Image (cartoon, grey):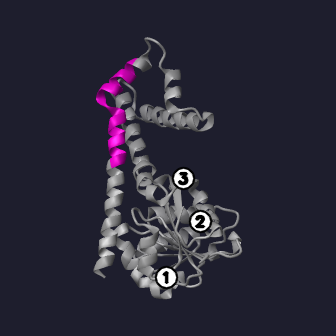
Amino acid sequence: MSAIGEFRMERKRIAVIGAGNMGGALLKGMLRMPWARPESFIVSDTDEVKLKALSKELKVKATTSNVKAIKGADVILLAVKPQMLDQVLEGIKGSLSQKQMLLSVVAGVRTDHIASAVGKKMSVIRAMPNISALVGESATAMSAGKHSSKNDAKLAREILESVGTVVDVQEHLMDAVTGLSGSGPMYVFLIAEGLSDAGVKVGLSRQTASALAVQTLLGAAKMMKETGKHPAELKDLVTSPGGTSISALHSLEKSGLKASLIDAVEAATKRSVELGKISEAAEKKH
């Protein structure tokens, strides 16, 4: 069943369950959009201090009751930790309508699991943003459940694009997305930290080394995005014969940088699968 009939963003009421980093980032992102009105949003969380601060900052309604939050909402954004999701769904399932849409950014949990947990043939859309949503530059993947219409997917995309770039993937690839871009900013932060430390080691001040490292990463990312060239091709532009960059590349290849990154993405992907299985096992016990 389609949750969304006429597609008019300015008319949609959106409830955000979870006032943590991701829920807060998505809420802030949506409120920057021309169609957004603070009175159309409500956020719920068990942490009253965090909830009060977010409500005061964004001028949106807030409540500690998830049931109260979802009443009259067109879209319910699930932004809680995986181990808390089933408890949240159990608490709201009796108050849900099939006209509503569930948009989940919970790692590792499938759309059919969510639909099964609430016991309704609802529109469920799964997405995986990353922490860069905090600055409007998230790399987000989304996948629509079997009861979602094209309008539902369009609405979810509109919400998710408020914090960055969105791509569509088949749901069986969402764990891989979690391993790559979901955890991705952490890999980049670690590389940035390493570059900054390296700059200090060779004589730069911490402030100078950090500024150069950050701008170098930003510039390199922009080159890849705007030129559309393969990273290997751009790498070859920098590595001139007998130069400094090829010497650095030789050192990186010996230390296995690429292999370490591949291993890290694979480990994060496996953990995402495990989180989904934990959630499924918890549901079966009920």
Dot label at residue 120: 1
Label 2: element kind: helix
Pick the residue in front: 190 or 170: 170
Q: Which residues are magenta?
A: 247-266
Question: What's the mark number on residue 156?
Answer: 2
Query: Label 1's element?
Result: loop
Residue at which label 3 appears: 135
Snapshot quadrant of residue 155:
bottom right
The location of residue 159, given as percent across then percent down, is 60, 64
Q: Earlier in the sequence, mark 1 or mark 3?
A: 1
Say left or right for 3 vs 242: right
How dense is the environment of label 3, judged by Cα within 10 Å: few (below 14), some, or many (20 and up)?
Answer: few
User: Relative to 68, is 223 above or below?
Assistant: above
Majority secondary structure in the magenta region: helix
- Counting other residues with Cα less than 10 Å from the Cα at mark 1, is it few (<14), some (14-19), or many (20 or more)? some
Observer-nearest of 212 and 285: 285
- Image quadrant assignment for residue 91: bottom left
Q: Please give the name of the residue rendered at 71% of the width and 71% of the height, measured from the top-left corner.
A: 8
Disc 1 residue type? Answer: Lys
Q: Earlier in the sequence, mark 2 or mark 3?
A: 3
In this view, the residue farthest toward the top is 242
N-terminal of the pair, mark 1 or mark 2, is: 1
At label 3, which amino acid type do we have? Val
**Secondary structure at numbered mark 3:** helix
